[in-house]
Image: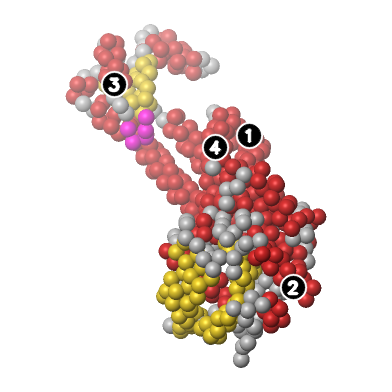
């Protein structure tokens, strides 16, 4: 078995090397297809980053009546935190709200004078709530509308933001569904192109399969070297495609900051490079090997 | 021992039927040298295809040694083929492999060890006078040389039977004589040889058993036969 395997690998490598031009042409096509496939994965990631960045900026605020006791507010905070839909709840006390307000308006003489004349804190305590998903905000809003909280809450900002949140949710869902459909279509297209390219490469050797069968070669022994060649096409194209995409991302990542200032595209890419590399290799090698297997099978009926 | 028992082969193309072999029966003993003669389309190549399991008979039974060829599955066929060496008019060498690798392939397919391959392949190529061209690819060899590589490949696993299907059809008279000498020598060393040809001079010079065929039928089977066809 081991001897057979080493012979299969030897013939696979020899066939790959001896049909240099054919191997190069096949690798070139598989490389271009993998670049397209990888490019789509990257584009999909960028879209997701862009959407989640916007999503991250959205929250709803609950403003409390000025006489609401702090321990009640903290109880409500705890209750909210226990909800599965809630990602985080930040409490801003009346004093903190005043501090923030003063810092924001320190250059404005009129505001500080007005505050001094009031001689009291006119601002309400509030809770800033971030949900896990956009659709969760309506659930949180309904929860806050409950009778238990009416006595303390003066207003919830959800009603002001509901249109933006709804619209964003629709954009997100279209982008996700569209991205998925596009990935499925491109994957099928890529698989078909790679399969046909390898099938054409193998077609040139079709007469040899019959000869090998007549000389006593088993199907496994005949097919093996071609599967090794298919694996090499996928491996080399996979490595080259990741290399090309890495160079592309390196030069274009700074432009991503124009749209998403908080995200460093290059470091995001490098932190996902290993899994991206593995995806490309699995896709390339898998298709190479399967295509070779199917393409050769047709000629092994002698 | 080879047995053909009432074997017929009918090819169906669309609804049209062509009888390639019609109720053929013959026995070939071990170590015999038998020549099949007949015009193109007489059924010689069909016999070869049925012997190596490339085709299955429409009717009848084909036995080679201990193998009932009709009943072999695709996975079992390689075992039969390792017991039969075949050479063809068009050589059928692997174009991407050197002469050495072409011969070695048959041994590798049979699962022989690397040590045996390194020892026997040069010997086989030496036997056919091509040791100095071991590293040449088929495209770098003449027709006669290619056929000698094919003979070395056919003989490398010491088969019980060597089938030569029009082996000299593409060769000049000098190379034809060389190949025939090789086939006779192989037969003398104990291998059953089945030769198909329509070369009258070859058949008449052999003085061996001749089976004559016409339109898929065996019309004559003679020990020390001659080429007699209408």
Q: Badge 4: few (under 14), some or many (20 or more) residues near its Cα, within 10 Å?
A: some
* Magenta residue span: A132-136
Q: How far apart, in angstroms, are the residues tagged by discs 2 and 3?
A: 94 Å
Q: Badge 3: few (under 14), some or many (20 or more) residues near its Cα, within 10 Å?
A: few
**Which quarter of the image is occupied by the C terminus of chain B?**
bottom right
How far across and how far down the image is residue B225, in percent?
62, 81
Q: Is residue A133 magenta?
A: yes
Q: Main secondary structure of the magenta part?
A: loop
Q: Is residue A244 magenta?
A: no
Q: Is residue A262 left or right of residue A76?
A: right
Q: Secondary structure beneath disc 1?
A: helix
The answer to whether marks 2 and 1 sit on the same chain is no
Disc 3 vs disc 1: Cβ atoms closer than 8 Å? no
Q: How far apart, in angstroms, are the residues tagged by discs 4 and 1?
A: 25 Å
Disc 2 vs disc 3: Cβ atoms closer than 8 Å? no
Q: Is residue A124 left or right of residue A51?
A: left
The chain letter under disc 1 is A
Residue under numbered circle 3:
A82
The chain letter under disc 3 is A
> Residue at point 76% right, 72% down?
B177
Q: Nearer the viewer, residue B148 or A183?
A: B148
Residue under numbered circle 4:
A278
Q: How far apart, in angstroms, are the residues tagged by discs 3 and 1?
A: 40 Å
Disc on the earlier residue, 3 or 1: 3
Disc 3 vs disc 4: Cβ atoms closer than 8 Å? no
Q: Nearer the viewer, residue B147 or A47?
A: B147
Residue under numbered circle 1:
A254
């Amino acid at each position: 078995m081991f001897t057979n395997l080493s012979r299969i690998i030897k013939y696979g490598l020899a066939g790959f090397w001896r049909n240099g031009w054919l191997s190069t042409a096949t690798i070139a096509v598989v490389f271009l297809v993998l670049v397209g496939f990888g490019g789509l994965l990257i584009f999909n990631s960028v879209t997701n980053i862009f959407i989640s960045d916007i999503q991250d900026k959205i929250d709803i605020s609950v403003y409390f009546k000025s006489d609401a006791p702090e321990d009640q507010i903290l109880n409500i905070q705890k209750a909210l935190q226990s909800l599965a839909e809630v990602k985080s709840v930040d409490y801003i006390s009346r004093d903190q709200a005043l501090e923030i307000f003063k810092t924001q308006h320190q250059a404005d003489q009129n505001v500080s004078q007005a505050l001094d004349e009031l001689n009291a804190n006119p601002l309400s305590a509030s809770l800033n709530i971030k949900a896990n998903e956009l659709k969760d905000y309506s659930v949180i809003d309904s929860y806050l509308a409950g009778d238990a909280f009416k006595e303390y809450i003066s207003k919830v900002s959800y009603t002001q933001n509901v249109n933006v949140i709804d619209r964003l949710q629709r954009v997100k869902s279209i982008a996700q569904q569209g991205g998925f459909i596009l990935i499925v279509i491109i994957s099928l297209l890529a698989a078909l192109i790679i399969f046909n390219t390898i099938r054409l490469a193998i077609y040139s050797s079709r007469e040899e399969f019959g000869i090998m069968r007549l000389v006593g070669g088993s199907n496994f022994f005949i097919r093996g070297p071609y599967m090794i060649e298919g694996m090499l096409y996928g491996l080399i194209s996979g490595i080259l495609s990741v290399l090309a995409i890495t160079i592309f991302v390196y030069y274009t990542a700074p432009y991503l900051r124009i749209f998403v200032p908080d995200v460093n595209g290059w470091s995001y890419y490098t932190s996902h490079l290993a899994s991206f590399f593995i995806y490309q290799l699995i896709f390339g090698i898998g298709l190479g090997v399967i295509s070779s297997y199917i393409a050769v099978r047709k000629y092994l009926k002698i | 021992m080879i047995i053909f028992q009432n074997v017929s082969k009918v090819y169906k193309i669309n609804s049209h039927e062509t009888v390639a072999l019609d109720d053929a029966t013959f026995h070939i003993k071990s170590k015999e040298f038998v020549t099949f003669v007949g015009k193109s389309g007489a059924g010689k190549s069909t016999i070869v295809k049925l012997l190596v399991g490339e085709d299955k008979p429409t009717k009848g039974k084909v036995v080679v040694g201990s193998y009932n060829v009709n009943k072999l599955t695709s996975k079992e066929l390689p075992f039969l083929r390792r017991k039969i060496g075949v050479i063809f008019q068009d050589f059928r060498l692997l174009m991407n492999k050197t002469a050495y690798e072409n011969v070695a392939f048959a041994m590798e397919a049979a699962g022989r060890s690397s040590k045996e391959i390194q020892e026997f392949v040069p010997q086989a190529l030496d036997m056919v006078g091509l040791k100095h061209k071991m590293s040449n690819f088929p495209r770098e060899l003449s027709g006669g040389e290619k056929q000698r590589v094919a003979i070395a490949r056919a003989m490398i696993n010491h088969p019980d039977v060597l089938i030569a299907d029009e082996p000299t059809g593409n060769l000049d008279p000098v190379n034809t004589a060389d190949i025939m000498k090789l086939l006779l020598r192989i037969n003398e060393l104990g291998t059953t040889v089945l030769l198909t040809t329509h070369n009258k001079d070859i058949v008449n010079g052999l003085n061996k058993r001749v089976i004559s065929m016409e339109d898929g039928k065996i019309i004559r089977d003679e020990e020390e036969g001659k080429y007699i066809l209408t």
